[in-house]
Amino acid sequence: MVPLRNWVVEEKGWAGVCTRPRPSQTSDLAICSVSLDMASGRSESNQDIPRGLVNRTGTPLGRGSRLPSVRGQRDLTLGGIQRKKFTPNLNVSKKTHGSNETLKGSSLEGPESTNEAKGALGRGRGRNERGRGKGRGEDRTIQLHSEFAHGPMGESSSGWSRGSVSGGGGGGGGGERQTGGSSTVIKASMRQRGNQDDKDFLDTLLRDDHCSPFCPVPITGHGSSLHVASTGGGWRRKPADTEVPVSKRRQQCFRKEYTEEFRVIQMGKTETCAFCEVCNSEFSIKSGGKNDIVRHIAGIKHSDRMKQESGTSKINSFFVQSSEKSKPNHDVIRAEVMLVDLITELNLPMASMDKFTRAFKTMFKDSNIAKQFQCGRSKGTAIVKEIAAKSTLHLAARMKAAPFTLSTDGSNDAGSKKLFPIIIRSFNPESHLVTSEILSIPVCEGSATGENIFSLMEAELTAHGIPWTNCLALGADNAPVMVGKGKGVYGFMSRKHPSLYMSGCVCHLIHIAAEKAAACLPLNVDQLLIDTYYYLDKSSKRLAAFKAFQVLHELKDNKILKHVSTRWLSIRRCLPRLLENWEPLLDFFKAQEKSASSSAEKEKVGKLRKIFSSPTNRLTCMFLVEALQPFDEINTELQSEAPKMHILHRRLEKLLKSLQLRFVKPTAIQGKLPAEVDFQAESNLRDDSELLLGQMASEFIARKEEVCLREERLKEFYSKVKQFYMTSIKYILEKLPYNDELLQHATILDPKQQLHAKLASLEYFLKRFPVLIPHATSVASIKLEFAQYQCLNIQSCIQERLDSTWVAIGQLREDGQIILPNLSRVMLNIMTIPHSSAHCERIFSHVRKNQTEFRSRLNNETVEALLIAKTREGQAESRDYNESELEDLKKAYFRSLQSTQ
């Protein structure tokens, strides 16, 4: 194909080249090659100037016609504005064969076509296609974009068309046609094709890498060129060396500055998304970046949500002023961290932080801190985990440098997984106290054998680089899986550290001793308390009837207390209330037995009525109130968090002696240790009338005729009392560490035994635990300090807690120098050996308070963080954080978001 006509014009820097087919050409597609470029060429004054616009007709310049505009976002008027874009319209709609022939004859044949036919066709197509105005054709029009530097000015004698065949695009489509001369319509038309051919043609027009075989070298320059051609063989791609690289559009990513400027905006799951805390939704910012955020905040959804939550707020309130960006508001961060500490301390759900955040803004409208306060459940959880992580690292560093003891216990939660909190007891130099802190709470997913539990502990110590030689003792309950020397946890640990001390729980053993002793009595007291409580608790009707009997006996309407069988010593708290309401309960069960509607209920009530009708049972309950007092006192004292190792041996001696003197003659006890007393010999036992039963039981026996207490039943009761005491003493001597060597030497810690303490006790600890000896210190220097300690007046140093007392002793000075710098450190490290496992039980009580049935989705990682943060020293309102710590806690939320991506 050979171009029929060429136009080259020099008009304000414009140049154009157009080719069109001959009328006899049988190609399926007319060829259109348009190039708009800045060039200098020859001018033919009276020729039509093609502008590279498809479906445009040329008209002489200077006729006052308005330059054509383009539609869409790139609409512009080509009036000499630099570097603008226009969109030529290329009609590719399907037409009938007749319309195509008419179009050929009218618009492509040049001078042979009549002006009337062309005008009619232009006007008709303009109306049918509804293409008048700024290029608003139907969606069958392809727009091809081109760049150029200048638009032509209407100063030449040549002009541009005021109309077009299609009626779209230019100003005043469908106007007059040029008379005479060749038509300069540049058009690419299609014959009838199938749908797939149409799609292929459209796709090709949208590409820049195809060229016509008749134009092997495209016209290049400052503008853009379109080369379209069709032959029998199909389309041909440009050579690789002439391809123009297509630039990819850059995506916007989230920046930290967005959060500092928009407080409610955080990074989403990906870098190209942002998350709005107000709307609780995520949106994309990859197109506009910051503009997308501004558009979201100004949107209706965001504005309505803000009005619902905090009243009407201006958009400016979400922006931080430039003066605020430079420095974080530590007061706001401190308030957020304090709220997290309070939520943790009070065992409240983390979801409540969302409510608190909104409530503060309403409650304290005039507070700048409340306005900037933003701490929901996600941010609060991140802060808790950051606090726990820092606390764990701090504890691990202390364990590397100083002695400690390790305690653990298994949870009794239902399920395949059991929690084993690893609790470290050590001297805290910051608080100057011996404290118990959680290192971690690992989960044992398999069987809770001694080997598996030991593996959990070893993994934690190895992960933090903590040596086993720094561990002085293992604290646990008395279960065989823990204290077993073969396959128990203690057995595996002793192979790692042979001098390790096994500290069982004395509180558990005392509890079991009292329970076994009570089993010798004729009445099962704990079962009586349980049956009575649940019979009344499950019916409001029964409670009302029981209150009526309380009023009848002129008693307060107090409830019967609930007894927990796993805490057997709580029986002493419940028995006085039961004895107080003994007569009302007897009358109540008599009435219930008469009105019972079924035989089963009548039988159940009848058993309770018989128990309350027996005076011997009432006497047994009175005796237990007095007999359990020694057990309850020592158990309460040993549940203390303060160190009690120094008094444990003496408290066990006191317990044994207190039990023996109640039924053994004084002559058998005098001058002997409790373990040396023969309490089973009949000759050493008191007479029945001399037994110490307590005031309440003694007064009841004195009224035995009044209360119908038979003599044979009374003798049987005395025998059971002696058996009660014998059973408890046997168990204590057999199971409790009364003869333990370490406990006997631990009395050296007691300042009250200052003058009676033995140097051998100090040598025992230094020899068994060499880690107690401070660095660059000799054993001889520690012994010398101990001798000085026994000669000092320490009355001014005595305090309530033993560790506080030794801290004060370690600060005593003479001539400006500390007298006992090493001895005090040794004593404080010995105090880390636990005297019970009460601290482990406290941890599990916190677990049950946090992981409830209403918070069943709380995972183990969050539970661990909550408990570590909760068991720190101090109260939430008294903790203080420096600015560096506050900034780290603030960044924790961003790090948590990044880790979830």
Image: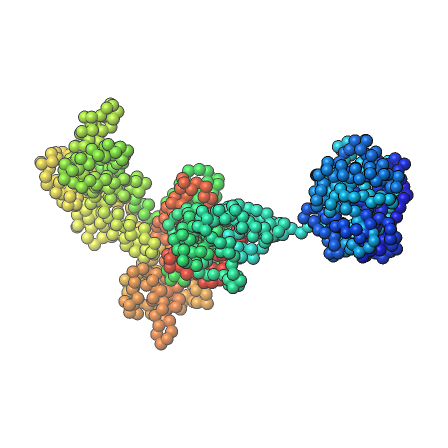
On the question of residue 766 being in view, the answer is: no
Q: Is residue 743 left or right of residue 228?
A: left
On the question of residue 848 being in view, the answer is: yes
Q: Which of 823 and 574 is in front in this view?
A: 574
Q: Nearer the viewer, residue 125 or 392?
A: 125
Q: Is residue 2 above or below residue 830?
A: above
Q: Residue at image x 34%, y 70%?
A: 812
Q: Residue at image x 27%, y 39%?
A: 562
Q: Where is residue 763 in the image (x, y as percent from the top left)?
A: 38, 62
Q: In this view, does 862 lie to the left or right of 812?
A: right
- Quadrant of the image containing the N terminus: top right
| Direction left: furthest residue | 705
| The image quarter in which residue 879 lies | bottom left
Q: Position of residue 147 (x, y in %)?
A: 76, 52
Q: Residue at image x 27%, y 43%?
A: 570
Q: Residue at image x 75%, y 56%?
A: 80
Q: Position of residue 802 (x, y in %)?
A: 32, 60
Q: How many labels does the image show?
A: 0
